[in-house]
Amino acid sequence: MSVFQFKQFDLEQSRSAQKLGTDAVLLGAWCCKNQTPYSILDVGSGTGVIALMLAQRFSRAEIEGIELDDNAYEEATANFENSPWNDRLFCYHASFQEFYSQDEEDLDKYDLIVSNPPFFDHKSLSEEVRNNRSVARFDETLPFEELIYGVYKLLHREGTFACIIPSDREKELKEIANHFTLEASRITYIKGTEDSKVKRCLMEFRFRDPDSYRDENTTSPTEFNTLILEEKRHQYTPEAYELFKDFYLKL
């Protein structure tokens, strides 16, 4: 189905290579739990679902998206324009690298930066798979190092960066973030069911406190928890229901 209906907005996705998935909805519902951001940047917006969810959640936030793919950019722009919050949403047609490489005086700072980043290692895939999978999910489009460097340049000192990644790349992302003085403040591990393995990791990062001495090997406490999505097929756990209830039409 090309149009996915949420409770407060519709999402057109007929042309975008990357269709709506649970990862994006998890991130849009989970991030920035105890804060109220007023300026938000969505890196790699795709169809714009995360930005739209954040516009619904934060009624005073100005939200900007960045999308490189032509079709996804056009759909995100249309989805923004057709939403109830079209006066607070805007999408740039550019790569994140182009966006953060502007002159320093032209760069805005954001209270919240979110990203559902590409996470397949392009080099590890066969030529046949590389030619048939969407470039939207390949690491070489936006490597973790370049993603975090852009966050370092664009995030307010008191701001938050939130993302969702495969759980087996948690250590890698932490190490890169630590190099840029960002440390994990909140992590939620995602399991499909009680008995399934953790496959995704929701992460929030904040800058290390500049007023207290702390070397690269010393970090602030991180809030950890695990979210199980389903008690059985098509039956959400109470925790997942609470997370999704404001968005999914049938909840």
Image (spheres, rainbow, N blue to C red):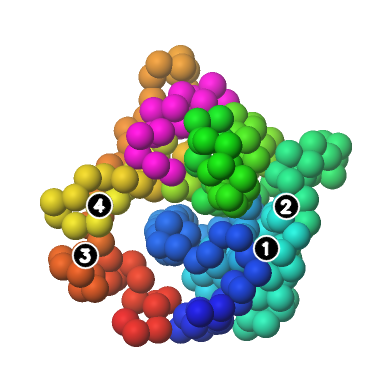
Residue 9 shows in the view: yes
| Above or below 159: residue 19 | below
Q: Nearer the viewer, mark 1 or mark 3?
A: 1
Lower sequence index among marks 4 and 3 = 4
| Residue type for callout 1 | Ala
Looking at marks 3 and 2 on the same chain, the residue that comes earlier in the sequence is marked by 2
Determine if the magenta segment contains residue 179: yes
Residue at coordinates 14% horizontally, 54% vertically from top-left? 194
Residue 172 drawn at (x, y percent): 44, 27
Residue corresponding to mark 4: 191
Q: Which residue is mark 2?
A: 68
Please indicate, yes or no, whether residue 54 appears anywhere in the rendered image. no
Name the element at disc 1: helix
* Residue bearing the label numbered 3: 230
Q: Which residue bears the numbered disc 1?
A: 72
Q: Position of residue 41 (x, y in %)?
A: 64, 54
1 and 2 marks in contact (CB < 8 Å): yes
Q: Are marks 1 and 3 in contact (CB under 8 Å)?
A: no
- Give the image location of residue 130, x and y in percent: 58, 42
Q: Residues within 10 Å of mark 3 (few under 14, many from 20)?
A: some
Q: Amino acid at mark 4?
A: Lys
Q: Identify the residue shown where x is 61% and y is 73%.
A: 14
In the rendered structure, which segment of residues is drawn in magenta? 165-183
Give x and y (percent) for residue 186.
37, 43
Q: Earlier in the sequence, mark 4 or mark 1?
A: 1
